[in-house]
Amino acid sequence: MTPHAQFGAPVAAKSGGAKKIIFILIGVLAIGGIGFAGYKYVPGLWAKYMGGGDINTPDGALKRVFNGLADNKPEVLWEALPAKHQKLINDEIKKSSANVDPEIQKKVVEVLKKTTGILKNKKALLLETVRKMTGQGGGEGGGIPPEITENWDGIVSLLEIVVNSKALTPEWGKNPDVGAVLKEDGGKLMSSAAFEKFANLAIAEADNADAPKSMAELRTWLKGIEVTVVSSTETTAKLKLSSADFKISEEAAELDMVKIEGRWLPKEVAEGLDQLVEIIKQTVPMGQQLGGDTQMTDQQKTMLSNFLSTLDKALDTINAATTSDDLLAAVGQMMGGVLGQQFAGLGEAFGGGTGGGGIPGIGPGPGIRPGTNPGTIIPGLAPTGPPKPPGYKTEWSVGGGKYKIDEIYPGKTEAIITQVFGEPAQKQGEYWTYRGLKVRNMRLGGTYTTVIFQMQNGKVAQVIVQP
């Protein structure tokens, strides 16, 4: 089993979709490893809490995961993992968190909370200001996409859950507990009306006749899957899946299970666990952005601290605005002046390396003058750099579109990848990570910026796309 290319996407159970449902568990767990962390129940307590089936049997273990997800309890994904992999994930989060300066982390969270509060309390004024900025008038939306105006409150409600999560605190990073936060915050997210609405919108956009029509129907399908043991030994089992709600192909209906450290897992999932841990290593929040594998230098800390302090004051000015003109002036203050220079200077403080001295996805920052050599640094401003490789200038897509990155590059050599995208931002085992790209998800909407090429025998085995 290989990591799913589009983590977090609501999945439609199709003909032959039973195995796909299993695979989605890994995708959701990857999200859990990125933003939420684990709770340890003893088998007896877990069995009592979840109800139905026996955790110590292959069919019971599978039904518990189905039922748990249907009941908005994502912590079942964590408990389904062997203790070894739980420890690996917790240890990796702890290691990454140790490289994050606690003062910086607290400031980042404070800014995120303040921003969320402004989005919540200044909704009408923000929308009015955007209409003025875009020159649109009239009507409630005033030319603003209805996806924003209609879902504003829902988006803010989800942001509130995330920014108030204990997983964002330095204290939690010292002793991460992946299932506890999965249970508390993951459960809140999955149970929220906003999540339900957005998931239903994504399912509707998929426009698949064989798919469930809503999350409610998908939950019913999950609970309705019948699991029968065809044969078993102490460490292996063959299961038969069936459903009265949707058709399961003969190939997908047969599922091989293996027992690892007392946990029954689909064989393909078990084979993909190490890869899952590698993906989580690359996507742990705060660690990559605010320290990565090394401690933040004094210069980095000073520049980032000054930037966050200036941004915090700018947000206070926005919060104090009572008219759209005041708000426009505050936005101008944020985008220009000291804040703009500090933002550009972060590229220099954190090593540049984004193809032009800017922030990934934004491009060259201020300080580039005609005639300067690549790498020239103008005091106080961002360094210049060589032109970006062609891969950064292309608008890629997944799930359709013109330049389907997930279909074009499997099988291509490492030399071709380097020629098109340059050197990766990070190499970790067989995974090459590129950041700052533009990849449009044609099925679910949105633009992704991180692409991971999995290399095997000198060629691309898989393309993984992440937000």
Image (spheres, rainbow, N blue to C red):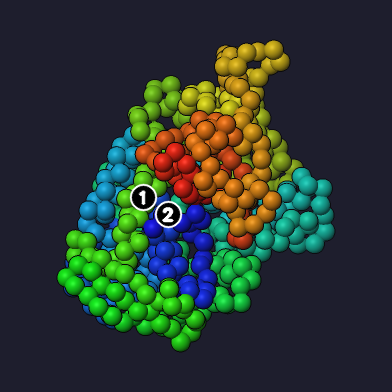
Q: Nearer the viewer, residue 52 or 189?
A: 52
**Is residue 467 left or right of 278 when viewed as pictured?**
right
Find numbered disc 1 in the image and state the secondary structure of the residue it sits on.
helix
Q: Nearer the viewer, residue 2 or 280?
A: 2
Amino acid beneath label 2: Pro
> Badge 1: how crowded within 10 Å, few (<14), some, or many (20+)?
some
Q: CA distance from mark 2 to mark 1?
A: 7 Å
> Badge 2: how crowded within 10 Å, few (<14), some, or many (20+)?
many
Q: Earlier in the sequence, mark 2 or mark 1?
A: 2
Placement of 276 over or under 39, stated as above or below: above
Residue 211 got which mark? none
Amino acid beneath label 1: Gln
Placement of 278 over or under 51, stated as above or below: above
Q: Residue at x 57, y 38 (%)?
A: 436
Q: Residue at x 82, y 54 (%)?
A: 137
Q: Which residue was labeled with disc 1?
A: 275
Q: Residue at x 48, y 33 (%)?
A: 425
Q: Is residue 10 visible?
A: yes
Find numbered disc 2 in the image and state the secondary structure of the residue it sits on.
loop
Q: Residue 194 location, x and y as percent?
A: 54, 66
Q: Which residue was labeled with disc 2?
A: 3
Q: Residue 423 location, x and y as percent?
A: 50, 30
Q: For residue 389, which quarter of the picture?
A: top right
Q: Residue 216 location, x and y as percent?
A: 50, 78
- The reply to whether dot 2 and dot 1 touch (C-beta < 8 Å) is yes
Q: Residue at x 29, y 39 (%)?
A: 95
